[in-house]
Image (spheres, helix red, strand yellow):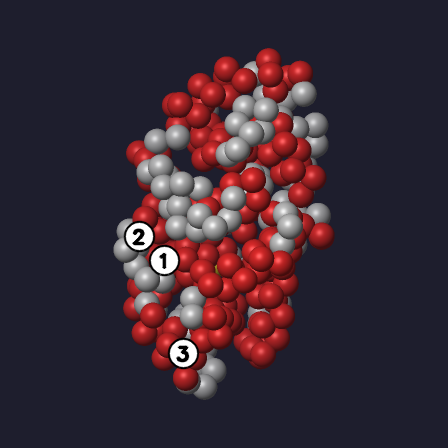
């Protein structure tokens, strides 16, 4: 893509300027970094990513409230939950259109996954073995969570499935894509690098308003609205700049969109 080559120097300048830990202060990943030594880091990261929509300051407050009210999403919290009868967790919780019911379903599904597989990491490893691309991985991951949620639909506010969009529906899957970026990319002071069993080639850039606007400005996409096709197009064009790890540009492009 001609424009990508034309703007390559500018895109790399943005990366050099913003791909720095000091810019984590305006990112939900800041909260996750506090729990890097936790045995439930993947679970903490997933919950944090799924509720990362809206204003950053409000996202961080919501995530901190969730973690504080669940013993830091500890192994004991999930193990106890797996043995107990279903009951509403954090009954006063509400963030945008999600309620305590959606959280309760998510926690119970994670507890069931840990009971069946030992951890979210082992669960994802099993799904990865069935996936021949990142698109299939995201699809299977989302479908498994929604399927397991059927056992707890009595808590559903009507918006639980919104937490797990699928590429097949055309969604850019921003929050799931962001979660996998956090987990898969190397620990470079930004991402966590705890799932090296998934290659970075399986990642797709998480498209939000900020990334979409900057990508359009620098010729990384021809699409006008966020979609799975836009995410794939941006990722494909970024491969011209880094064929192995194109999604490394996500954090910096998002910061540029927010701050410039």
Q: Where is the N terminus found, in terms of image quarters?
A: top right
The residue identified by callout 2 is: 36
User: At numbered mark 1, what does the secondary structure look like: helix, strand or loop?
Assistant: helix
Q: In which quarter of the view is residue 160 placed?
A: bottom right
Residue 6 in the image, given as x and y percentages of width and height: 59, 13
Residue at image x 70%, y 27%? 222
The residue identified by callout 3 is: 81
Let me know if residue 250 appears in the view.
Answer: yes
Q: In which quarter of the view is residue 187 placed?
A: top left
The residue identified by callout 1 is: 41
User: At numbered mark 3, what does the secondary structure look like: helix, strand or loop?
Assistant: helix
Q: Where is the C terminus found, in terms of image quarters?
A: top left
Residue 8 in the image, given as x and y percentages of width and height: 54, 18
Specify few, some or many for label 1: CA neighbours under 10 Å numbering under 14, 14-19, or 20 or more.
Answer: many
Residue at image x 39%, y 28%? 18
Residue at image x 58%, y 72%? 148
- CA gap, disc 2 and disc 3: 23 Å
Specify few, some or many for label 2: CA neighbours under 10 Å numbering under 14, 14-19, or 20 or more.
Answer: some
Let me know if residue 178 appears in the view.
Answer: no
Determine contact: label 1, label 3, CB under 8 Å: no
């Amino acid at each position: 893509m001609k424009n990508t080559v034309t703007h390559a120097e500018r895109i790399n300048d943005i990366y050099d300027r913003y791909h720095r830990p000091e810019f984590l202060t305006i990112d939900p990943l800041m909260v996750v970094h506090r729990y890097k030594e936790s045995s439930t880091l993947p679970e903490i990261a997933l919950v944090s990513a799924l509720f990362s929509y809206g204003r950053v300051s409000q996202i961080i407050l919501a995530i901190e409230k969730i973690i504080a009210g669940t013993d830091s999403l500890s192994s004991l919290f999930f193990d106890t939950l797996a043995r107990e009868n279903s009951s509403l967790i954090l009954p006063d919780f509400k963030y945008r259109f999600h309620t305590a019911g959606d959280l309760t379903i998510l926690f119970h599904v994670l507890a069931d996954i840990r009971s069946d597989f030992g951890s979210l990491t082992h669960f994802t490893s099993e799904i990865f073995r069935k996936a021949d691309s990142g698109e299939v991985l995201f699809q299977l991951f989302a479908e498994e969570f929604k399927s397991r949620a059927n056992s707890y639909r009595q808590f559903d506010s009507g918006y639980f499935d919104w937490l797990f969009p699928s590429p097949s529906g055309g969604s850019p899957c921003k929050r799931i894509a962001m979660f996998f970026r956090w987990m898969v990319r190397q620990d470079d002071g930004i991402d966590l690098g705890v799932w090296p069993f998934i290659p970075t080639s399986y990642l797709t850039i998480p498209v939000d308003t900020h990334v979409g606007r900057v990508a359009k400005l620098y010729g990384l996409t021809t699409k006008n609205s966020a979609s799975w096709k836009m995410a794939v197009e941006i990722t494909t064009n970024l491969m011209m700049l880094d064929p192995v790890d194109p999604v490394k540009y996500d954090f910096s492009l998002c910061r540029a969109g927010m701050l410039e």
